[in-house]
């Protein structure tokens, strides 16, 4: 069972907190990888919050290819950062030749573009980069978005931390939102793209459990939007559905839960909004999930969201202090990093709720 | 001297031979009394006494049961004689030398008719070669069929894609901004689709009672399709109309009464089914032999006693555009766009084109696509149609579903599949597999008759539904036969079968870890046949 | 026997002791005669489970901080476990006799399959807690005490034992047992204080009797002192707030009317075909007499030679003679046709009895 975590804080946090959060939650398979997405960045990134950061792992040729593409599109690099690699002997990691974290200025053509136009450009560019890198197995494009930084690697989380120097506090690399998972998808081939968190168009999602309606979800999503690609992990479907509901259809977030785990007909019949809920249940029946899942997400607004499957077959707990909220699979992780919190404020989300952590860290629980 | 001629019909030509053991017979007469076909009769047999010599023979007369040799009164193998015989002295035995179909055509210059299902079975059953092979175990817990909650409901009606629902935002809520096509949430098994006339009033009413009972006592939202033979006004005016899907076919039988009842209806019907074709005899209209056109059937249908043939096509429909306009629009309008209107066609090579056209209908008024495969049953058909026309259901259902997937429109017109389901005793499995292949639900007719007491099968037993002499009182309008059917037992048996099927569907949903219908979850299926694997796009296993 | 306490820290620098390393270390210490453990854990599993003091009469005690899943799983009598704080899933899974005190919340499936011992939780327990608890009559009834509430689907398939959910500090919760709890429960007892919603229909919720109150009074005293909250006794011991949940006996589980009753009582009066056919709904047996016959005999006296073959061969004794006429009694005749067959003069002819109901 994957262990996942999402941290949101008023302070800038270093990725070591994610390593510590996940450490006590290790299970048999949880040494197969480590991946995290940092958002609302501090350190050297804080000066460029509006400019897209390319997060990528590639061969030398892939790096050149990506830079050529961005150059051709008119993007200009304004910041380049690389982790200090500690390549000591005996680390369990399968590194890529290059890790690219670069901030770009938008092309001149987009100087006066609207937010929507810029987002469209970034999505298109990210898809193009991914496609070109995939062609000759040149590398992996994880995210290309303002204020978002992604790293995914295969190996022992502890050793990945050591390799990238993540255990040490580093003022260059810190963020107010960090989402992480310490495991690769071990059901099928180990593929970097299959590692959570997944990112698309401002939305970050990580989940655990198997999506038993994967085929139904995928069959339907494939034709809904250009960015619904890959499907290396059945959990990507959760991201695409969230994106579809909230960004494409522009429906309020509470309808996400109504889409993925619709209430039964009998329950809906008793509600004043039954007309709407039955239509959603019918029209988006192929986006329903029916497996055991906890889904954590970071929304474009920077808020966190947590929903569970309707049978509540995966654990999740939310712990909080004045300045930090953590959603994660098991309480042990929170005990390690927020040891002094008031545990009576811990939240164990149930099968019928959506939990939202606002930007001021207030926690809302919406009953489905 | 008594002689025979070679062209005279002989016992050896018939499909069934009566095996009679005189030594066990007590001459009670029960066998001949119950034979509705008049295929056996008591007769006096003349026998030579062994003690007399041939020069001056003496004879004795012996009372025996004799098989009748005639086109009209031949044995159909229904087996009622052996059921009533106290000593097991008589039974019908399949004649392997049967030449009946040749002799009938040669003698009558007429095509052979029968009821039931195709007896050829040359294509085998695809569904039996498919298994539910993806069982959740470690990664995704299975569910307990008996105790977990499952939802077995499927939408019926035109489903619009989410971006076409016209939702409006009002603060944090979505609101409707326009009238949307009617949707109903029904049980994924629709029963019936068998006409008044084709089956006895008791059988028809038993199905209707079972439907009402399943809804109101068992809480299973099962719907029944009426068939094309009209509907009793008492039902139209009752609250049970809401469980009935009214059928209209090319004969339009009974619709004048439906129209006249409209002002007095207290409920909308569950839907309307426009029958274009039938799997058992695609391209052929309904057929009700005169022998079954009882007076009440004449009245409900508005016709005299005669062989009633529905035209093979709806008169005045020459294109899909026209049918959408005339039939769908009119039927929608009839109930003020409150009842879903669906279409039933025989599975055919062309089904996908029809489905695509309906998916693209700009009025969004087609609320279901019923696809009927060649193994479907019928009350009466020409044998040539029954045995040699049609298309198996499984691949065509799959084709339609995948055509919708290709356009990103799966689910917009719910698919219902039927035709020979439960033929090998595994109705829930058949239904489940078709749902995994993309059906929203299934429909069944013939199986209900078997549940109620039909003794026929798919290898030539009985299949005399067309004669009106149904020994079980199911496909007959005769008082003496129909009253053999216990309406309460028939209805109870149907109810029981649905309850069992409901449990069995859950027994299949549980292991794949799903509490709602796995529509289109073909990844749950495997097949032991490579061709099926390739054709349906499901995993091959061996 | 060694009286000094074994203190184990499982995280040194960034190196975390694995579950296997920790459990083997504990076992080796027990083998050395130690019985008292204080463990600063980092999510390691199964701590305190399936072990016993070298001297079986001694108590094996564990004080644990931040354990992982299944703390006290498969624990035996003689084991005492105190968890300082919350614990994740499967606390006391298959507990077979230990006393487990959790001074915080428990994750999902706490007390799952517990068949012995006592579990005391100073907080909430998660989804499916108490599922499949059992009682082996050769051992003490297992007890599972929860100060606050449970998650949904609690006590599924419960077969025995006693669970107590005190509903303390549950604010505006509409159910202290979550939703759909007690599904498939066939045995055991649950005492609950506070609102219950959407509970399985295979159980009944009833009021307490005197013996229940006696049990709760004694038990609450022990429970509250174990979790150092004896001051809550007054508030919780208001027994009118409590209910008791037990399985519904199978014989009174839903009895539905038959379809025949449904037709008579609920269905359209006289049937939906009542306009056309007056059906008495009588069912004809096979063979039948009277109207139920497929064929009926008719007698023609012209050729009769009074041979009485028909009368003597009729298997139903339906034929009798009146004056010079032979008559078949419709109420006896089944229409077999033997009279027709045996008559040398063809006086009996069988006709079809096919007709419609009107």
Image (spheres, rainbow, N blue to C red):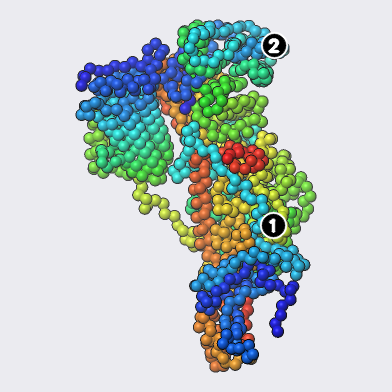
> x and y percent of residue C187 in the render?
33, 43
Q: At 64% from the left edge and 16% from the top edge, which residue is drawn?
A: A138
Q: Residue B415 or B255: which is nearer the viewer?
A: B415
Q: At 40% from the left edge and 35% from the top edge, which residue is drawn?
A: C128
Q: At 78% from the left edge and 53% from the top edge, which residue is drawn?
A: B316
Nearer to us: label 1 or label 2: 1
Secondary structure beneath dot 1 equals: helix
Write down the residue under mark 1.
Answer: B386
> x and y percent of residue B279 in the render?
68, 53
Write down the residue under mark 2.
Answer: A68
Apparent side of residue B520 relative to residue B281 in the rendered image (left or right): left
**In this view, A344 is above or below B449:** above
Q: Is residue A159 visible?
A: yes
Q: Which chain is indicated by disc 1?
A: B
Q: Which chain is indicated by disc 2?
A: A
Q: Residue C221 or A55: which is nearer the viewer?
A: A55
Q: Quadrant of residue A37?
A: top right
> x and y percent of residue B202 in the render?
57, 64
Q: Is residue A119 visible?
A: no
Q: Residue A112 or A137: which is nearer the viewer?
A: A137
């Amino acid at each position: 069972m994957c262990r996942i975590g999402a941290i949101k804080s008023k302070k800038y946090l270093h990725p070591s907190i994610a390593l510590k959060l996940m450490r006590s939650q290790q299970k048999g398979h949880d040494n197969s990888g480590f991946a995290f997405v940092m958002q609302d960045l501090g350190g050297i990134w804080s000066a460029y919050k509006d400019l897209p950061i390319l997060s990528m792992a590639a061969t030398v040729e892939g790096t050149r290819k990506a830079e050529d593409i961005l150059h051709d599109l008119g993007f200009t690099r304004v910041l380049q950062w690389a982790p200090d690699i500690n390549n000591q002997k005996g680390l369990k990691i399968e590194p890529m030749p290059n890790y690219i974290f670069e901030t770009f200025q938008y092309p001149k053509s987009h100087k006066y573009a609207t937010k929507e136009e810029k987002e469209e450009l970034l999505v298109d560019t990210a898809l193009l980069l991914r496609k070109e890198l995939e062609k000759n197995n040149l590398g992996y494009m994880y995210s290309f978005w303002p204020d978002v930084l992604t790293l995914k690697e295969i190996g022992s989380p502890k050793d990945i931390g050591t390799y990238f120097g993540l255990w040490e506090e580093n003022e260059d690399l810190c963020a107010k939102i960090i989402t992480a998972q310490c495991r690769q998808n071990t059901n099928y081939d180990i593929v970097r793209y299959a590692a959570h968190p997944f990112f698309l168009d401002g939305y970050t999602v990580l989940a655990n459990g198997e999506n038993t309606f994967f085929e139904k979800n995928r069959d339907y999503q494939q034709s809904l939007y250009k960015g619904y690609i890959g499907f290396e992990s059945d959990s990507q479907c959760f991201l695409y559905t969230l994106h579809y509901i909230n960004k494409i259809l522009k429906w309020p977030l509470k309808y996400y839960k109504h889409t993925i785990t619709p209430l039964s007909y009998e329950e809906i019949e008793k509600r004043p909004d039954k007309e709407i809920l039955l239509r959603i249940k019918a029209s988006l029946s192929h986006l329903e999930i029916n497996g055991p899942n906890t889904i954590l997400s970071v929304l474009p607004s920077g808020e966190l969201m947590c929903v569970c499957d309707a049978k509540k077959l995966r654990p999740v707990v939310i712990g909080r202090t004045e300045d930090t909220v953590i959603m994660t699979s098991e309480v042990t992780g929170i005990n390690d990093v927020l040891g002094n919190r008031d545990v009576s404020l811990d939240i164990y989300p149930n099968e019928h709720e959506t939990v939202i952590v606002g930007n001021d860290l207030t926690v809302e629980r919406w009953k489905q | 001297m008594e002689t025979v001629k070679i062209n005279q019909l002989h016992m050896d030509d018939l499909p069934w031979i009566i095996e009679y053991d005189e030594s066990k017979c007590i001459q009670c007469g029960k066998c001949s009394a119950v034979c509705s076909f008049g295929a056996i009769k008591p007769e006096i047999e003349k026998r030579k006494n062994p003690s007399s010599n041939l020069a001056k023979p003496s004879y004795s007369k012996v009372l025996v049961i004799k098989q009748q040799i005639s086109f009209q009164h031949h044995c159909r193998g229904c087996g009622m004689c052996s059921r009533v015989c106290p000593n097991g002295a008589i039974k019908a035995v399949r004649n392997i030398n049967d030449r009946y179909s040749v002799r009938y055509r040669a003698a009558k210059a007429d095509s052979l008719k029968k009821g039931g299902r195709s007896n050829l079975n040359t294509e085998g059953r695809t569904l039996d070669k498919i298994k539910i092979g993806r069982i959740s175990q470690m990664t995704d817990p299975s569910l307990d069929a008996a105790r977990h909650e499952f939802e077995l409901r499927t939408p019926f009606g035109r489903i619009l894609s989410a971006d076409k629902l016209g939702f409006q935002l009002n603060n944090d809520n979505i609101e409707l901004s326009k009238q949307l096509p009617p949707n109903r949430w029904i049980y994924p098994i629709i029963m019936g689709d068998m006409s008044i006339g084709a089956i006895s009033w008791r059988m028809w009413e038993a199905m209707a009672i079972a439907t009402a009972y399943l809804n109101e006592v068992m809480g299973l939202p099962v719907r029944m399709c009426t068939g094309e033979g009209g509907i009793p006004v008492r039902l139209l005016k009752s609250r049970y109309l809401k469980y009935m899907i009214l059928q209209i076919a090319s004969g339009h039988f009974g619709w004048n009464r439906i129209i006249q009842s409209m002002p007095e209806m207290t409920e909308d019907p569950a839907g309307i089914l426009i029958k274009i074709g039938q799997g058992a005899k695609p391209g052929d209209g309904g057929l009700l032999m005169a022998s079954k056109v009882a007076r009440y059937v004449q009245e409900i249908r508005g016709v005299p006693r005669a062989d009633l043939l529905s035209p093979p096509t709806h008169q005045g429909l020459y294109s899909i555009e026209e049918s959408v306009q005339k039939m769908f629009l009119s039927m929608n309008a009839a109930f003020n766009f409150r009842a879903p209107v669906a279409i039933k066609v025989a599975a055919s090579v062309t089904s996908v084109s029809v489905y695509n056209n309906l998916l693209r209908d700009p009025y969004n008024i087609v609320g279901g696509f019923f696809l009927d495969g060649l193994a479907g049953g019928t009350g009466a058909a020409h044998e040539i149609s029954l045995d040699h026309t049609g298309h198996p259901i499984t691949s065509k259902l799959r084709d339609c579903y995948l055509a919708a997937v290709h356009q990103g429109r799966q689910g917009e017109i719910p698919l219902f599949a039927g035709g020979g389901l439960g033929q090998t005793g595994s109705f829930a499995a058949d239904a489940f597999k078709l749902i995994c292949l993309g059906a929203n639900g299934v429909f069944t007719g013939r199986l209900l008759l078997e549940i109620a007491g039909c003794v026929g099968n798919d290898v030539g037993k009985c299949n005399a539904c067309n004669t009106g002499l149904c020994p079980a009182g199911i496909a007959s309008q005769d008082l003496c036969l129909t009253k053999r059917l216990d309406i309460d037992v028939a209805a109870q048996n149907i109810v029981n079968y649905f309850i069992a099927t409901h449990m069995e569907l859950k027994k299949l949903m549980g292991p794949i870890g799903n509490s709602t219908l796995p529509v289109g979850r073909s990844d749950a299926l495997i097949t032991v046949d490579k061709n099926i694997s390739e054709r349906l796009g499901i995993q091959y296993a061996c | 026997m060694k009286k000094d306490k074994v203190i184990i820290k499982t995280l040194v620098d960034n190196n975390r002791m694995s579950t296997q390393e920790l459990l083997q270390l504990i076992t080796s210490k027990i083998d050395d005669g130690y019985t008292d453990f204080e463990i600063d854990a980092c999510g390691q599993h199964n701590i305190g489970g399936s072990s016993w003091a070298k001297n079986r009469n001694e108590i094996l005690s564990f004080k644990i901080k931040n354990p992982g899943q299944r703390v006290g799983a498969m624990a035996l009598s003689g084991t005492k476990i105190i968890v300082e704080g919350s614990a994740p899933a499967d606390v006391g899974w298959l507990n077979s006799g230990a006393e487990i005190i959790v001074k915080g919340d428990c994750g999902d499936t706490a007390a799952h399959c517990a068949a012995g011992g006592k579990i005391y939780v100073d907080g909430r327990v998660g989804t499916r807690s108490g599922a499949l608890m059992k009682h082996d009559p050769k051992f003490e009834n297992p007890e599972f005490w929860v100060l606050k509430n449970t998650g949904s689907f609690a006590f599924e398939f419960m077969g025995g034992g006693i669970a107590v959910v005190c509903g303390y500090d549950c604010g505006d919760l509409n159910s202290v047992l979550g939703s759909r709890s007690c599904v498939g429960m066939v045995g055991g007892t649950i005492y609950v204080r506070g609102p219950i919603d959407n509970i399985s229909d295979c159980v009944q919720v009833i009021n307490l009797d005197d013996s229940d109150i006696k049990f709760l009074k004694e038990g609450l005293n022990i429970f509250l002192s174990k979790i150092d909250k004896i001051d809550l006794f007054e508030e919780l011991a208001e027994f009118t707030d409590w209910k008791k949940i037990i399985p519904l006996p199978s014989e009174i589980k839903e009895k539905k009317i038959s379809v025949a009753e449904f037709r008579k009582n609920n269905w359209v009066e006289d049937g939906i075909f009542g306009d056309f056919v007056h059906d008495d709904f009588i069912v004809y047996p096979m063979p039948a007499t009277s109207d139920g016959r497929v064929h009926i005999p008719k007698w023609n006296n012209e050729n009769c030679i009074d041979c009485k073959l028909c009368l003597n061969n009729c298997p139903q004794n339906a034929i009798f003679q009146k004056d010079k006429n032979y008559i078949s009694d419709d109420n006896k005749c089944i229409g077999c046709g033997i009279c027709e067959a045996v008559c040398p003069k063809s006086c009996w002819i069988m006709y079809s009895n096919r007709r419609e109901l009107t």
